[in-house]
Image: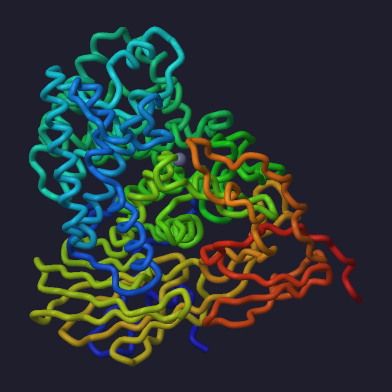
Amino acid sequence: MIDRSRRNFLKTSAGAAGLCLIGPSAAVQALTANVPEHPSGRLLPFPLASVRLAPGIFKEQEEINARYLDSLTADRLLHSFRLTAGISSSMTPYKGWEDPTCELRGHFAGGHFLSAVALASAGSGNTVLKARGDELVSGLAACQKKIGTRYLSAYPTELFEHLAQGKPVWAPFYTYHKIMAGLLDMHQLTGNTDALQIAEGMGQWAQEYFMGISADQRQRMLRTEYGGMNEVLVNLAAVTKKDRYIDAAHLFEQPGFLDPLAGRRDELQGLHANTHVPKIIGAARMYEVTGDRRYRDIAEYFLAEVLTARNYVIGNTSQDEHWKSPAGHLEGTLAWTNAECCVAYNLMKLQRHVFSWTADARWMDAYERALFNCRLGTQNAQGLKQYFFPLAAGYWRAYNSPEESFWCCTGTGAEEFAKFADTIYFRRGSDLYVNQFIASTLDWKDEGLAVEQVTQFPREQDTTLKIKSSRPALRTIHVRIPTWTTEDAQVKINGGPLEAIADPGSYLGLRKVWKDGDTITVSLPMELRQEPLPGDGSVVAALYGPLVLAADLGAVPPDEAYRIIHSGDTVPKNLPAASPLPKVAVTSDADVKQWIQVESQSELRFTVTGESAKSQLMPMYQIADQRYSVYWQMESLKKQS
Ligand SMILES: [Zn+2]
């Protein structure tokens, strides 16, 4: 047997001629340890236009999302913007959170929608959606020009006055952020220069407005959700090279929230999750642009804390949109209203930033967990998205209506399903990092290198990277060896197996002169395992590799109102009570293989063999029209002697 320990690994030379293994690229460390930034600098994502999804589960979902976006028209999206600017519109407005009476109107119409079509344009070359985005930008430019103060939104500045005066108002800066971000995405991803000009005007208006308010009053106003105002202003500073927007971003900081995190204290209980994750993304961007280490410490501590002490097995957090319990205590929190989907979207954005600082595989393991379990599967065949992700037993998935909801999660979902290609590969210098196992192609023009990733992962446990190179070149290709794989993981170069491999939970660095036609085949065996709910070891979820398994509990109630929510509400009306968790009777030291069997590795089908249940199990992402449970109540049996 080959000893695959890291110590031995580092001493072992590979069998393939000319190959030098330099991994693990990042040591496995305690989850909250400070990992120094790599001396060669940060990793960078590839431009979206360099990566294309190949046929497979992600490509299919990308196309469904694009068809939904294509069903929305620019004139209807612009309706409330035009009325606010004093431009007539006779179009039928969209409803829900885009209704002309809703205080969040414009957040999707001029924000998420713009980001999503910009991502679709860059990520899949969708020219129809690019044109829709350009049409919308031109309509928004006309509105901003008519208003004449550089302000732009689908609601009047009166809502900001309500905020300043402490009157009830939803979240005007939250929506303002979405619109600025959509415009910046149209500029950065599609090259629309008008979009940058509009965004800059909005940034100047926000800065001047907020500067005119006392520091105390600003802090009171910041108690109301403001999305990623700090992030978008840092991004604007990075694009325009103007420090004034860094100053503006600092106005949107709350010492009361950031200081405990800088001191590594979890004071998150009681806070609204999706109000606060974007503030940390803003802190991450502030570190990247200014180099101020305090912001990095805040981001790393926050992310590690949420992913360990406050995370459900699917890779997302929150109950009733909040962190309601002390750290490490999720017992009693399983409900319909778990894990708001846009929180996962924002946590994944944060994971990309933190990963780029250290190349630490744990962040890409977490990204994969969320991607396969609480992003994939949250869109139905019509392109409609989930809001909550129920984790109490016996519930099911519910989606927004096509034109009457427009939740935050409709918007973040529309973006997510247009950018599956953005994290598969990263680069540093001439090094390539393969982070995710998704059928795709990479065209790295500057290096004369293309990579075709051929896989049906997770239905197969292998992935093959085919190298196409205009010239032989010495470089290191780093491949993530996930935490969930086994000691039987294997890597082959041009069909020849390597004698050693990096530990699960790290990157394997493969350094050699790569030439056209070379192949890397990675075999990542999956196995069953179980994870307890934080705070209650008797409640567990089962996983197979990165996949959370769900029990099929039968058909969803027939009333369509339980599945599609035709309003801005986020929970179906008259929900029945949750079912008790399904029970499994096992010995107290039970291994998961004692109560689950793999029926089909290729079809990803499993059965429960415990005494009190005979359920069929499948990956959570494949649950579409069934009631389900991802958690089980373990009932201990006395050990047989
Ligand atoms: Zn949401």
Most foreground residue, 166 or 267: 166
| Residue drawn at the location 56% of the way across and 68% of the way down | 619
- Relative to 265, does residue 191 appear above or below in the rendering? below
Name the spot of residue 465 as percent of width and height, x first.
Answer: 29, 79
Name the spot of residue 368 as percent of width and height, x first.
Answer: 44, 61
| Residue drawn at the location 33% of the way across and 89% of the way down | 15
Task: State the image quarter where residue 452 is shown.
Answer: bottom left
Name the spot of residue 404 as percent of width and height, x first.
Answer: 43, 40
| Residue drawn at the location 40% of the way across and 59% of the way down | 364
* Residue 115 in view here: yes
Q: Is residue 146 left or right of residue 109?
A: left
Q: Where is ligand 1, by quadrant?
A: top left
Q: Is residue 578 left or right of residue 166?
A: right
Name the spot of residue 120 as percent of width and height, x first.
Answer: 25, 56
Most foreground residue, 205 or 278: 205
- Relative to 531, does residue 213 appear above or below in the rendering? above
Q: Is residue 581 left or right of residue 484?
A: right
Q: Is residue 556 left or right of residue 35?
A: right
- Relative to 6, does residue 134 appear above or below in the rendering? above
**Screen quadrant of the C terminus:** bottom right
